[in-house]
Amino acid sequence: ANVAGLWGTPRQSLQRACRELQNAGLQIVSRSNQYLTEPVGAGGQPRYLNMVLVVTASIAPGSLLRLLKRMERQAGRRQGARMSARPLDIDILDFGGRRVSARASRRQLGQLVLPHPELRGRAFVLQPLRDVAPNWQDPVTKRSVTALLARLSPKARAGVTLDSAGNSCRS
């Protein structure tokens, strides 16, 4: 989250998203620290507030994706330019090591691909992922989260800083 939406500030949106996930029957097992991160994409955006949750779910990955996209809309996210500012953006990074793919030439916006196809190059995903799953290994490359993070440039890693205000997803 990096702009206010229907659920309030980015911090309030993350807090509400945690409650909504729990209300939908998902159990939050672990929460990362929150990180302030430089935006990727269109310039002039405020920094993002990012975190990673480990949840247990008794629903299929596609159903989970639909739930998350509905939550984003409820928080005020509207379709716009790719990588633009948004009040809430929730991605499924991994689902128990499952691999779900779509040919790049036929992939549609919002289509589920597991593990998330861009996580390997994003320090703002890998840093909080390492907080909650330090032994996680990419099902595709078999590299650890620490190894993936180490492969990124110092500039990419420097754009991710611990949020001193704490974690808005605490119960």
Image (cartoon, helix red, strand yellow):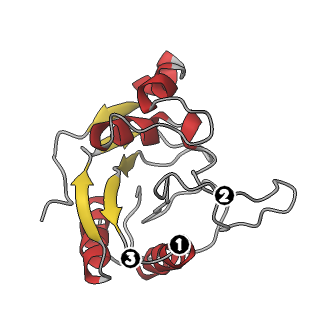
- The first of marks 1 and 2 along the sequence is 1
Q: Disc 2 on helix, strand or loop?
A: loop
CA–CA distance in space, label 1 to label 2? 18 Å
Q: Which residue does the numbered mark 2 point to in the structure image?
A: 82
Front residue (pair 110, 30): 30
Front residue (pair 51, 38): 51
- Residue 58 numbered tag: 3
- The first of marks 3 and 2 along the sequence is 3
Q: Quadrant of residue 157?
A: top left
Q: Name which residue lies at 29% across and 44% down.
A: 132
Q: Disc 3 on helix, strand or loop?
A: loop
Residue 114 location in percent, x, y? 60, 55
Q: Name which residue lies at 26% across and 82% down.
A: 23
- Residue 65 numbered tag: 1
Residue 99 in the image: above or below residue 75: above
- The first of marks 1 and 3 along the sequence is 3
